[in-house]
Image (tube, rainbow, N blue to C red):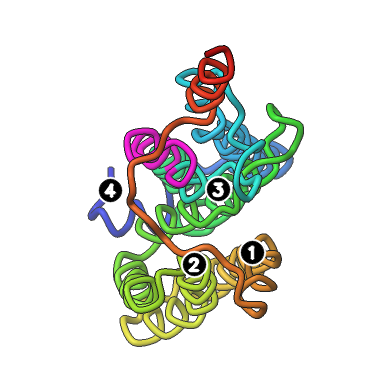
Amino acid sequence: MFESFTELLYKGLLGKLLEINPIGDEKIFFLLLALGYTAAIIIPYLLGSLNSAIIVSKRRFNDDIRQHGSGNGGLTNTLRTYGKAAAGLTLLGDTMKAFISVAFGYLVFGYWTAAIAALFCMLGHMFPCFYKFKGGKGVLVTAASMLLLDPITFALCMLIFIIIVAGTKFVSLGSVMGAIFFPLILNRVATITGNIALLGLPCIIAIIMAVLVVFMHRANIKRLLNGTESKLSFKKKTPPAEEAKKEETEEDK
């Protein structure tokens, strides 16, 4: 059916089926086209709305991560609040929902719907319909989506992130800078490698995703400028619920 894996990435499963079995009725053709793009929006958004940090905090600690630290339902706040084990589960959950969303997008019409799926998974993560539209900042979802959209771009942005975080211990600064470089590097890599499918809509969506990440970090940026931003720490954390019980026990004594 597909001459190469690259053809699948360019055209998608639905796109290839429409090519093999052309539909004479234009109304039906455009209906299928609309359904494909709609599915690439709705399904990733719903998957994105399954916020792993919120789920982990509720299921494991009977708590809400958004009531602690930065108030953000994301990986860094989970690490700071509950420790490495909870952060690991959050990392796995948010990565998988991004992978599934983008892979689904590829199966529809290739690169373009994959990029659309990445954006709406990110929007679901930031503004989850299941949790009163208050979620995370979208960095992990963006990174996972970036990996599937273009591994070279992902590697270069991740290198920028690692260097900044290693040098400053500010995850927020590394996240913002990595996001800013995302569309710039994607455009450059697409031009150098000749992967024209990544030019146009995917680059525009990369710009939108970068702007959203920066916007969601506006409070962090303000704290960075004021010198009050928290640095990354891997010290073992006591979950807030357990800490509260400990304090109550001590008071009873």
**Disc 3 residue type?**
Ala
Image position of 97 with respect to 197: above or below: above
Q: For label 4, count other residues whose C-alpha is less than 10 Å away and answer few (under 14), some (14-19) or many (20+).
A: few
Q: Are marks 1 and 2 in contact (CB under 8 Å)?
A: yes
Give me the residue at 53% from left, 52% from top. Answer: 118
The residues bearing labels 1 and 4 have C-alpha atoms spaced at a distance of: 42 Å
Would you identify the image quadrant in which residue 200 lies?
bottom right
Residue 80 magenta-highlighted = yes
Q: Is residue 17 visible?
A: no
Position of residue 64 relative to residue 154, above or below, is: above
The segment highlighted magenta reads 79-94
Dot 1 and dot 4 residues touching (CB under 8 Å):
no
At a point 51% along the width and 73% down the height, the residue shown is 173
State the separation of the CA atoms marked 3 and 4.
Answer: 22 Å
Helix or strand or loop: what does disc 3 sit on? helix
Q: Label 2, on which residue? A: 175
Q: Residue 39 or 162: which is nearer the viewer?
A: 162
Earlier in the chain: of badge 1 and badge 3, it is 3
Q: Determine which residue is flagged by label 4.
A: 2
**Front one among 159 and 252:** 252
Per the image, the residue denoted by label 3 is: 117
Between 205 and 231, the one nearer to me in the picture: 231
* Label 1 to label 3: alpha-carbon separation: 22 Å
Give how far across and how far down residue 69 sits, in percent: 60, 46
Task: Report how far apart the C-alphas of labels 4 and 2 lie in the structure.
Answer: 37 Å
Q: Residue furthest front?
A: 253
Label pair 1/3, CB-CB below 8 angstroms: no
Q: Earlier in the sequence, mark 1 or mark 4?
A: 4
- Determine which quarter of the picture holds residue 180: bottom right
Task: Look at mark 1 in the image and give the residue it sits on.
Answer: 217
Q: CA distance from mark 3 to mark 2?
A: 21 Å
